[in-house]
Amino acid sequence: MALIDITLNAYNFFMTLSTFQQISLCIFIPFIYNIIWQILYSFRKDRVPLVFYWIPWFGSAISYGQKPYEFFEECRQKYGDVFAFMLLGKIMTVYLGPKGHEFVFNAKLSEVSAEDAYQHLTTPVFGKGVIYDCPNSRLMEQKKFAKFALTTDSFRRYVPLIRNEVLNYFENSDSFNLTKQETGIVNVMKTQPEITIFTASRSLLGEAMRKRFDATFAQLYSDLDKGFTPVNFVFPNLPLPHYWKRDAAQQKISQTYMKEITKRRTTGDIDENRDLIDSLLVHSTYKDGISMTDQEIANLLIGVLMGGQHTSASTSAWFLLHLGENENLQNELYEEISKTIESKGKGGNLNDLTYEDLQKMPLVNNTIKETLRMHMPLHSIFRKVLSPLIVPNSTYVVPKGHYVLVSPGFAHTDERYYPNASKFDPHRWDEPSTTNKDSDEIDYGFGKVSKGVSSPYLPFGGGRHRCIGEQFAYVQLGTILSTFIYNLKWKLKNNHIPKVDYNSMVTLPEEPADIIWEKRETCSI
């Protein structure tokens, strides 16, 4: 009764105040509570240092969202490699550097969960029953199903398909139209999403599926990509335009996949070695005997293609921009590609390029590697804490319900690990590195991967959620880069590299991102 009386008295007092006083009090009390809570929190020796913030609930969202790496560095200078910050009502514990990679990527399933961290974010994009909208054991088996189309024999078939798609784009797209133009200006944030969606769909999904794709599909995948923002992370569904576009894109892409799947089922035209669609139609039964539904297969295809599209689009856009300010590096690449082709005998040209040739071109591969170092597509990777998580060699405990965050991209650009980290220099990789090698391997269900995640260089993540598309990415990007270099030379239109746009969770170049291109003498068109 006493509590009720106190509440009623407080309410009656509040109602006697003027409207201005009431509004002021509603604003003032949360701010005071927020500051007192942070002060009390700071006295706890079992909690990671918390970055101070003024605005309740909102926390450090603006500083983190606009320039995450700068925010991390400022916090590191003040608190060290381990700290926490408030992000839209969620406390994120950050552990920077290789030790942080081990802390998060090698954590047990009983301790942290990617599914609980991402499910509400990814399910509207990919659809139900796949990726993070299923138990982790199911996801591991789905990755195994997808790997049937990621074999060396598959990569051998993909190289000429990818090359031809790029050449067709050079010839027929409005951006290049090389049959009529000797030079021109293109926006790489328009061309690269289109090129990567065409090359990925043709190689992974087959000719029939590729014919269903046009330039609008690149836009649909771009609309899907906009579903991965910090706002979506907190609010998965809001009545806003980019949410409507995300949902419409998901439905149209899913329907397109379902039409092709239904056609193949109906006609019986299925060859498990032909493409990823057929492979999944044959290899999609879980160990417990339950098979994926056709809708789930379509949803998984969205996730697989998106994994290859938005990251490769970003990476290829960045290497075109960096090479645009380095004519000498373009010439070095051209010489390496030309020598590789000429080694096949007289009359050789780009049409002779093979998967094995890509393995013999270190500068091509190191250019991709350096681009991924400077511009890792995902700047932050989250996990939700399921049980109290002890930070090694400290008194800190991350409570259940909090989040842990790791940022390999921050380590990639840290001077402690890479001297002159802000300089684009593929030659820094000329000497073979042993930092990624680890004889201790583990199979999470989709093939053996290294348990070692202590390297500062982890562009494809690590642990059970390591990206299975690493080899395909190098095949796709290597073929795209070789085709560009052999046919064109280019420079930046504005003489400087664009800044990074962090509005999405993928690190894209800010627009305008234009290059001025011209044909080489060896141009195939």
Image (cartoon, helix red, strand yellow):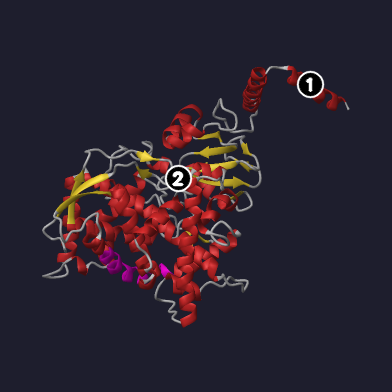
Residue at horizontal 57%, vertical 36%? 88
- Given residues 295 and 461, the one toward you in this image is 295
Q: Which mark is residue 505?
A: 2
Instruction: Report the residue marked by disc 1.
Output: 12
Say if 300 sits above or below 492 in the image.
below
Say which quarter of the image contains residue 54: top right
- Distance Cα–Cα, label 2 vs label 1: 47 Å
Residue 87 placement: quadrant: top right
Residue 190 can be seen, yes or no: yes
Q: Quadrant of the N terminus?
A: top right
Name the amino acid, label 1: Asn
State whether residue 336 appears in this view. Answer: no
The secondary structure making up most of the magenta span is helix
Relative to 389, is 443 above or below?
below
SS state under label 2: loop
Which percent across, then down, holds residue 125?
51, 55
Q: Residues within 10 Å of mark 2 (few under 14, many from 20)?
A: many
Numbered disc total: 2
Q: Label 1, secondary structure: give it.
A: helix
First to last magenta residue range: 149-165
**Amino acid type at image mark 2:** Met
Query: At x 64% / y 22%, what residue is drawn?
Result: 23
The answer to if 444 sits in the magenta stretch is: no
Residue 445 image point, x, y percent: 54, 64
Of 94 and 250, which appears nearest the observer? 250
Q: Magenta span has 152?
A: yes
Q: Which of the two labelled residues, at mark 2 and mark 1, occupies the earlier sequence position?
A: 1
Residue 109, position as x, y percentages in the image: 61, 53
Residue closest to the eye, 238 or 467: 238
